[in-house]
Image: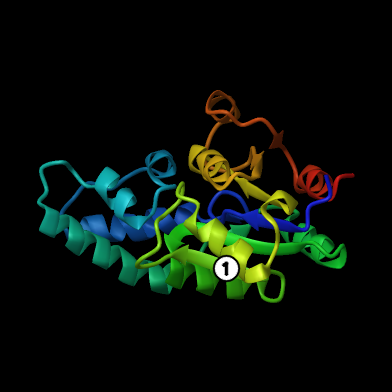
């Protein structure tokens, strides 16, 4: 099918953000006297927003107030350092340029804090995304369909003409809750076998393959 709108998850789908997330998390943990987390641990912890990342990373014996302080420390550090090591995945810039030339609209919907989504979108994808939405007050996080619905409304695209693209079980559930087709990429933060078990029907291994699915080629 030739879609009119491609909605992308950010972390693990179009941007490899894991190193910067780990560094900011470990900075905040160290400030609070908590043990550092490995890259593989952070990979498992991400996907459900900043609050969940901290809940999963902080030892269970810490108080709610301590966890809130760690979250705030993480936000402050990540706002400054969110693009230190982050890079687009291979072929993503070319993919977005190709979609733009083909008349397919593009958007980002992420559980990352909206401040970071706007910063990273501007830095890496300026002029290539029609809309970008991150985690913000009053909007339910994925897998709730709220942010996806907001994009559809803003860009005035019918649901059946849009596809949601991600790399995790959260993205599979988001597309299902939004009543949309879903494409899952294999290069992100989850293993292919895990994604298949969680219901991924279409899994792609390259930006070129993703382009072909979006444009019905």
**What residue sits 76% from the left and 48% below the top?**
207
**What residue sits 67% from the left and 75% below the top?**
126
Q: Determine if residue 84 is in view.
A: no
Q: Nearer the viewer, residue 58 or 195?
A: 195
Q: How many marks?
A: 1
**What residue sits 26% from the left and 61% below the top?**
71
Image: 13 above or below 123: above
Image: 5 above or below 137: above
Left or right: 147 in relation to 216: left
Q: Determine if residue 162 is in view.
A: yes
Picture quadrant of residue 64: bottom left
Q: Residue 87 at what x, y percent from top left?
A: 60, 60
Q: Residue 206 at what x, y percent from top left?
A: 75, 43
Picture quadrant of residue 79: bottom left
Q: Residue 214 at what x, y percent from top left?
A: 78, 49
Element assignment for label 1: strand
Residue under label 1: 132
Q: Nearer the viewer, residue 43 or 201?
A: 201
Pick the quarter of the image with the C terminus.
top right
Q: Nearer the viewer, residue 215 or 186?
A: 215
Left or right: 136 in relation to 186: left
Residue count near mark 1 (Cα–Cα under 10 Å), binned few <14, some 14–19, many ≥20 = many
Q: Nearer the viewer, residue 169 or 125?
A: 169
Pick the quarter of the image with the N terminus.
top right
């Amino acid at each position: 099918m030739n879609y009119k709108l491609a909605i992308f998850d950010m972390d693990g789908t179009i941007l490899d953000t894991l190193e910067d997330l780990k560094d900011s998390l470990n900075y905040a943990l160290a400030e609070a006297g908590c043990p550092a987390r490995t890259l593989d641990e952070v990979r498992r912890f991400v996907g459900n927003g900043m609050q969940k990342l901290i809940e999963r990373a902080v030892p269970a014996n810490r108080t709610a107030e301590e966890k809130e302080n760690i979250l705030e420390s993480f936000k402050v550090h990540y706002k400054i350092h969110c693009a230190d090591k982050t890079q687009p995945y291979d072929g993503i810039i070319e993919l977005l340029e190709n979609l733009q030339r083909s008349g397919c609209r593009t958007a980002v919907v992420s559980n990352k804090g909206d401040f970071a989504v706007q910063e990273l979108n501007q830095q890496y994808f300026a002029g290539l995304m029609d809309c970008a939405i991150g985690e913000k007050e009053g909007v339910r996080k994925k897998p709730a369909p709220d942010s996806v619905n907001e994009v559809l409304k803003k860009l005035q695209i019918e649901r059946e003409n849009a596809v949601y693209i991600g790399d995790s079980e959260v993205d599979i559930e988001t597309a299902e809750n939004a009543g949309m087709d879903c494409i899952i990429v294999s290069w992100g933060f989850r293993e292919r076998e895990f994604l298949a078990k969680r219901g991924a029907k279409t899994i792609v291994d390259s930006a070129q393959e993703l382009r072909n699915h979006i444009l019905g080629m």
